[in-house]
Amino acid sequence: MTKKYSKVKNMLDAGHFVVCSEMGPPIGADPEFIKKKAHYLKGYVDGVNVTDNQTAIVRMSSIAAAKLAMDEGLEMIIQVTARDRNRISLQSDILGASALGLRNILCLTGDHQSFGKDPGSKNVFELGSVQLIKAVTEMVDNGILLNGKVMEVPPKMFIGGAANPFADPFEMQMIKMQKKVNAGVEFFQTQAIYNIEKFEYWMEEVRKRGIDQNSYILAGILPTRSAKALRMMKKYVAGMDVPDHVIKRMDQAKDKEKEGVKMAVETIQRVKEIKGVRGVHLMPVAWEEITPTVIKEASLYPRPEVE
Amino acid sequence: MIVAKQKKVNEVIDMLGDDFNSLLIVGCGTCVTVSLAGGEREVNSLAEILRTYYANNNRDVKIETETVKRQCDFEYIDQLENLIKENDIILSLACGIGVQHIVERHQDKIVLPGLNTSFYGATLKIGEWSERCIGCGECVLDQYFGICPIARCSKQLLNGPCGGSQNGSCEVDPDIDCAWELIYDRAVKLDKLEDLINYEPPKNWEVYRDGGPRTLIDQEYHEDRKE
């Protein structure tokens, strides 16, 4: 078995409560955009996801952006969706990412392209997330491609997947999560949590199935400063569960930014107490600069040093 | 059956252009008659609209109509041989197969499509059809309790629902049923949920049109004929 190297993995293995965040690449080719974002995250997070054309909108490649940010000293997690690439292209990109030194991957099916600005594009979805996870596991652990070809130098990756506690049908989503574990997933990042009671119940079900014993679960936190954004998420973002009382709270807040930070910190503190939750994944959309503040106020700073 | 939709009249008029004096509109009596797009009724009503249009625009255009049983069989196309020869342009109100089949018999003719061929579907009620199959070449309905995740899941997922499935609806449109909700509900009803636990490997798309355009030859039939 190939020895893997990933700082995020090492931290989780060492039992630390891990903090990840997310960065969206630019719609354009400016490397400075990435470098700037990397600078305000440095030292505050253990790993940073780079989204892969999220909501099906064309942006700089997640692998290229991740390499730029890695060169600024961040540990990066590349998101790879199966929406736009077939098995040939997916495996090729993963080999390239590993060759560049990227060591963490989040395998996703991907938002449907009808959400983005190219609804007329042809989708691929040749693999789903479970099949992508399995393919990466085979590549990493056994050095074998989907076509059976054995590689002399296999890629090294810490393999992640997504889980949505708020999607239906509940039981079938659990079966799928278990399939991801069986396929070799090592960590999960969840959909953003606003309905904490539902999340607690979901974690209970996750524990019942022993999924938390076979993978690391990072709870998704989405700091926001606007009630409008919450309403939009409730209505338009696939698989989101935003209870009305959350929207009302933001509506009534005088200082929305302060309230947004407070809400995120409260959620972090609450999920930290749930058995089986091994870290958080922060994904502030269009408010990435708030990440250090949230982490400090949640008493998650400074971050522990791990090789 | 194949479900199709009529092209807009102004699109048809643009497509036909100015360089003709006679037009034959050919309907198809099978699938597209059922989907109310290219049967005798639609052929006649389109002919009426076009006659009025050309009359109003002082164009002397002769329009004839005919509907055959199936445009995807030479047997029926050949019944139209003279009519096709007599007219400058043929407008086929069949699916794309019918259009191409007329072309195959009449290489010197301009044959135009009057329909947008949409999908393989079923009639839900009069005037409403829904996609049920994509002709992937290797049927998996046995594994999914008779509900096709290839045709009915927006992401063609074989291992379970995506995170966008909520309240039985697809993330693409709340009016689209989540195929995985349907599969799950059937599994529960049949008490066979454990059948959905196994990992399903990537599908072989070589038998779909990813392997190149397909031709099917029934060897057995041909051998029987030889004997």
Image (cartoon, helix red, strand yellow):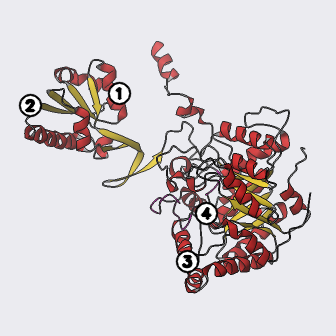
Residue A292 point in image, percent of width and height: 75, 70
Say whether disc 1 or disc 4 marks the residue closer to the N-terminus: 1
Which residue is identified by label 2?
A: B60
| Label 1 in the same subunit as label 2 | yes
Residue positioned 32% across, 30% down in the render: B99
Residue positioned 7% across, 36% down in the render: B58
Q: Is residue A44 magenta?
A: no
Q: Quadrant of the C terminus of chain A?
A: bottom right
Which residue is identified by label 3?
A: A227
The three-letter amino acid code for the residue at tag 3 is Ala
Whether tag 4 and tag 3 are in contact, CB under 8 A, the answer is no
Residue A240 point in image, percent of width and height: 59, 68
Q: CA distance from mark 3 to mark 1?
A: 56 Å
The three-letter amino acid code for the residue at tag 1 is Gln
Whether tag 1 and tag 4 are in contact, CB under 8 A, the answer is no
Q: CA distance from mark 4 to mark 3?
A: 39 Å
The label shown at residue B188 is 4
Report the span colored magenta: B159-177
